[in-house]
Amino acid sequence: MTGDPGVRVRRIRADEADALREIRLRALADTPLAFGSTHGREATFPDERWLSWARDSAAGAAQATFLALDGADAPVGLAFAVVDAGGRNAHLYSMWVAAEARGRGAGAALVAAVLEWTRAGGARTLRTAVTIGNDAAGRLYDRAGFRDTGTREPLGHSEAEVAVLERDLAA
Ligand SMILES: CC(C)(COP(=O)(O)OP(=O)(O)OC[C@H]1O[C@@H](n2cnc3c(N)ncnc32)[C@H](O)[C@@H]1OP(=O)(O)O)[C@@H](O)C(=O)NCCC(=O)NCCS
């Protein structure tokens, strides 16, 4: 586990599908322009979708979800990492910290957990995307060693664009 004494980060457990649904839907409702998906879309996901997300993220080398927990063990943050077939490139998605828990290192601890997990699995690069203008997230990724690849893509559900960032895991 990582993080300061107030917030700790650990990998999700297979039996935490309900907690995952709750925090993910909170994130999508809180910051719609930070994500390529939408609350309207994911609120309709059936139970099985959340069960498989939690189960497939709790163990194994293909994907991992990390939760940030407050001092009372309530989830206050989320990050989701997926490794491409072949294992060389990994992707970071769904990064979110509840407003009441921000500014205490939870975001940095979530990124650190993803870096540690992807590196341990042998991936060479970790990619993520940040919406242009999301300066708090941009600073977080900059501090964690991501660089701007220069690639711009549409967010998908709005006019917003994302910048594709990459972290060299050998560095
Ligand atoms: C981006 C986000 C994940 C950052 O989470 P966070 O938990 O606040 O991140 P951190 O606490 O690690 O860092 C935030 C700031 O607090 C500062 N900080 C970290 N620990 C601190 C501490 N113990 N004391 C004082 N300041 C601290 C950091 O230096 C950073 O400063 P900055 O705002 O000048 O850059 C969060 O703002 C968020 O969820 N935003 C909405 C969703 C979103 O944008 N997701 C990203 C999608 S790409």
Image: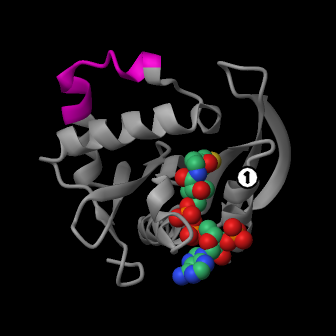
Q: In this image, 3 relative to 91: left or right?
A: left
Tell me, yes or no, if residue 89 can be seen here: no
> In terms of depth relative to the viewer, which is nearer, 43 or 166?
43
The answer to which image quadrant residue 136 occupies is: bottom right
Residue 144: x and y, percent? 65, 71
Figure quarter occupied by ligand 1: bottom right
Task: Tell me if residue 46 is in the magenta stretch.
Answer: yes
Q: In which quarter of the image is residue 74?
A: bottom left
Image position of 32 with respect to 3: above or below:
above
Residue 89 position within the rendered picture, expressed as x and y whole percent measured from the top left: 57, 52
Kindly identify the residue that appears in the image at 42 percent across and 65 percent down. 121
Element type at mark 1: strand
**Magenta extent:** 40-51
Single out the residue that lies furthest toward the front.
100
Residue furthest toward the bottom?
5
| Placement of the C terminus among the 4 image quadrants | bottom right
Q: Residue at x 46, y 72 (%)?
A: 116
Local crowd at mark 1 within 10 Å, few (<14), some, or many (≥20)? Answer: many
Residue type at numbered disc 1: Leu
- Main secondary structure type of the part rendered in magenta: helix
All told, the count of numbered labels is 1
Please tell me which residue is depicted at 28% across the width and 43% down the height of the picture. Answer: 20
Q: In this view, does 52 lie to the left or right of 67?
A: left
Give the residue at mark 1: 165
Looking at the image, is 16 positioned above or below residue 70? above
Q: Which residue lies furthest to the right in this view?
A: 150
Task: Residue 64 in the image: state x and y as whole percent.
Answer: 35, 53
- Image quarter of the N terminus: bottom left
Name the spot of residue 115 as percent of width and height, x first: 51, 68
Asked whether 157 falls inside the magenta stretch, the response is no
What residue is shown at x 57% (from left), y 70% (from top)? Answer: 103
